[in-house]
Image: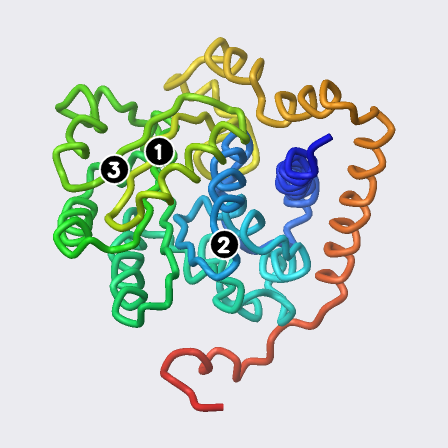
Amino acid sequence: MSKLSFGLYKKLYTIRRAEELIVEHYPEDEMKTPMHMSMGQEAIPVGVCQALTPEDQIFASYRSHAAFLAKTEDTDGFFGELYGKQTGTARGKAGSMHLAAPDQGHLCSSAIVASCIPLAVGAAFANKQRRNGKVCCVFFGDGALDEGVLWESLNVACVMKLPVLFVCEDNHFAVHTPTRMRQGYKSITDIIGRFDCNVFQEDTTDVEAIYRLALSALESIGKPAFLHLKCYRYLEHVGILEDFNAGYRSKLEFDAWYKRDCLAVQRKRLLADGYSEEDIISAEKLIDEQIANSIRQARAASFPKPEELYRGVFHETD
């Protein structure tokens, strides 16, 4: 039996269950933040973050829940931030789209499309100058491929041979606009491959396949690496509902992706690997209790004091 396989499943389950409870509690209107849900895409940040070392750094887009929890496993700070409380990762001031935990290697998430990409390249440059061996990984959606700053950042990373891992979570849409209506080229990997950059591509919901692919990419990190990974978000672009009535995607497409749901794939592997149904359910119950406790703590915590608005604006020594 593989501890790695079980550990990956527990991370997937933690993210999925956390978001299921967001869906359940969000209508209560206590979480004062927009939600960009990660359901369906969890295997990418979990697999990639598993391949990174604890010292490596990540940046994420506004669809940040999965990346944050995959890197930190901090459900207390996560829900504290969603509820806007001082126990949150940014003392309640950042919300869902700006999650970060610098002490744990999650340097930044940003609500502006592609804006974390140059920051990640800058961090990779700092790591190379310091010779500290850290890799910087940046997650972004396929909408970021339409932004000039991606190409500028990729170019300079390749010229300077920076230790940066670009991870494109391609869910086929920029909000409601499909790839075919936005991109005047056939293959993003063909174009990226013309740079001095190692390119890897996969269309899978198997977290272990993504983990192995990320390990291969990290072995070549003497220069930048680019992972292009297909995925599918289950819920609307922003919010906790389905959006098939909007007409830009079909329920049939959803059903096809859901048949290979990342949790189901990994659960099936655990059972084939010798774990019992009781083993899995027991682990799930512990995670359920952890998340329920995180929500209770967040609700009971205090809101930040008004003067907290003035902290974190400029550099502070204390």
Q: Is residue 308 above or below residue 211?
A: below
Image position of 132 (left or right of 9): left
Badge 2 or badge 1: first in the primary sequence? 2
Kindly identify which residue carries mark 3: 198
Look at the numbered disc 1 and give the secondary structure of its residue.
loop
Q: Is residue 141 above or below residue 73?
A: above
What is the CA distance from the residue labelled 3 to the residue labelled 2? 20 Å
Report x, y in % for residue 183. Answer: 18, 26
What is the CA distance from the residue labelled 2 to the residue labelled 1? 32 Å
Look at the numbered disc 3 and give the secondary structure of its residue.
strand
Kindly identify which residue carries mark 2: 53
CA neighbours of label 2 inside 10 A, class few (<14), some (14 to 19), many (20+): few
* Marks 3 and 2 close (CB-CB < 8 Å): no
Kindly identify which residue carries mark 1: 175
Q: Residue at x 46, y 39 (%)?
A: 238
CA neighbours of label 3 inside 10 A, class few (<14), some (14 to 19), many (20+): many
Q: Residue furthest bottom?
A: 318
Badge 3 or badge 2: first in the primary sequence? 2
| Residue 20: numbered disc | none
Image position of 213 (left or right of 32): left
Q: Nearer the viewer, residue 47 or 15?
A: 47
Can you tell which of label 3 and label 1 is closer to the viewer?
A: 3
